[in-house]
Image (cartoon, rainbow, N blue to C red):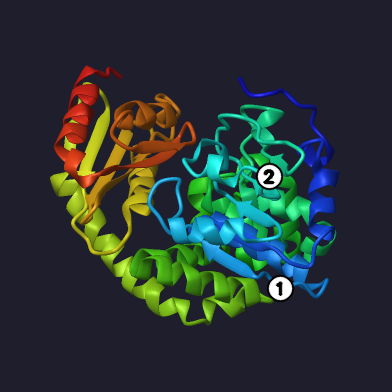
Amino acid sequence: MVVKRSAGPSGMPFNLDKARAFLEETRSYGIVFDRDSDGICSAALVVKYLRTKGIEPVLAKCKDEVGINVSDVLLDQMKEQERVITCDLPIDQSPMEPSLRGVKMLVLDHHIPRKDLSSRTVVHINPRFEDAKLYRPTSYLAYVLTQPFSTKYCWLAGVGVLSDYGLKDCKDLIDLVAKKHPELVLKELYDQREMWNSGLGLISNIISAAYGVEGHKGATLAFDVVSNAESPEDITSSALMKHYNAYQTELEATMDDFEHNAVRFEKAGALMYHIASKYKIVGVLATRVAEAHSDSVVMVWRATAHNVEMSFRCQSGRVDVAALVKELTRGLGEGGGHDKAAAGSVPIEHKEEFLERVRRKFEGLTV
C-alpha cells in the first residue's frame, strides 16, 4: 500500500524542498523522460532551469523501449551519472527499478504509484501520494518545482498539462497562461475537448507528431526544439511542422478507417481496432476515439516486428483501464497508466493469446 503523505505548497508533496535541493547539489546530471508531450515539456522545463545555473545535462534522452522500460544501453548510461532526473516515467513499477537502486535520483511522476521509492538516495514526487484522485501531469510538477523561474514558460507547462488531460486539477497554471498568453487558449479554459483546438493544443500535437512520424529520432528532435524554445512561435515555426502535417494527414485517414473497421462489442460498450499505419499513432488515435465515445472502453493496437503495442481509454471512468491492461497483459508482457488512459505491450509471439484475452474480456463486460 502506498504511503500517505501530507500535501505541501500548491498541492505538491512535503519533500518539495528536497527536490529543489537535489537540483542545487550537483554540476553533473542526466535526465531521462517519456517521449510524449508531457514527458518532453516537463524535461525541457527542468533543463531550462538548470541552464540558468550554467549546468547542461551530460545525458538527456527519452525512453527508448516500449512499455515502461528502457534499453540496457540507456540503463547503463543512467547508472553512470552522478545524479539522474526522470520525468513522466513510473520508475516504481518498471523492471529497471532494481537496477537503479543506489543511484541518486529525482523521480517526477504522476502515474498511479505502486510504491514510494523515497530513500536516502531517491526523492520521489508524485501528487497521488497525497491524494489518489489528484491528477497533475509531470509538466505541472516541473513548473512548481522550478518556480519562480518557470513563470516565464508557463505556456510550455500548459502544453504538457493539456496533452495529458490535466486541465481541471491545474487551474492555477491554466489561469496564468490565459493571462500571459490569451492567444493560446479558448474561452472554456478547463474544457479538455474544446482546448484541443487552442494554441496549446496545436503545440501539443506538433510535439506528439514528431514521435509519431519518426519514433525515437523524432522525439529527440522535439526535445531539442522545445528545450531551446523561448516562445510558442519557436515551436510552430520549427522543422517539427513537417512531421505535424504528415501526421495529421495520416491520423485523419486512420480515423475514417476506424469508423468502418473497428470491432464493436455492443453489450460491453467496447471498441477494438488494429492500426496498420507505419506511424506511431496508437495513443493519439485512442484518445481521439475516446473523445467521440466517452463512455466506451477503447482499445487500439498495432503489431511491430517484436511487440504488440496497445492503448486503452475510457474517458468516463466507467472502467479503470490501468487495472484492465495490467490484467490483460499479466504473464505475457507489461502495462499500466491512469484510470482513464493506459498502455502496454506484449512480445509478438503472444499476440494471439493476448487478443483472445481481450475478446473474452470485452464479451464479458456489460455497460
Q: Residue 207, how many percent across, how many down?
A: 49, 66
Residue named by callout 2: 170
The secondary element bearing badge 2 is classed as: loop
Q: Which is in the foreground here, disc 1 or disc 2? A: 1
Asked if disc 1 and disc 2 are in contact, CB closer than 8 Å, the reply is no
Can the viewer see residue 186? no
* Residue 218 appears in the figure: yes
Residue 347 figure quarter: top left
Residue at 64%, 42% (x, y): give it. 136
Whether 64 is drawn above or below 232: the answer is above
State the separation of the CA atoms marked 1 and 2. Answer: 29 Å
Residue 1 lies, with reference to residue 162, above or below; the image says above
Q: Quadrant of the C terminus?
A: top left
Residue 331: image location, x then y, percent: 31, 29
User: Residue flagged by tag 1: what amino acid is it?
Assistant: Glu
Q: Which is more toward the observer, 286 or 16?
A: 16
Quarter residue 109 falls in: top right
Left or right, 345 with reference to 351: right
Instruction: Give the image location of residue 25, x and y in percent.
Output: 84, 58
Q: Quadrant of the N terminus?
A: top right
Instruction: Tell me if mark 2 has few (under 14), some (14-19) or many (20+) residues whose alpha carbon lies within 10 angstroms of its own.
Output: many
* Residue 165, placed above or below residue 247: above
Q: Residue at x 55, y 62 (%)?
A: 77
Which residue is nearer to you in this view: 57 or 162? 57
First along the sequence among labels 1 and 2: 1
Residue type highlighted by circle 2: Cys
Residue 56: mark in rendering? 1
283 left or right of 271? Answer: right
Q: Position of residue 224 (x, y in %)?
A: 56, 75
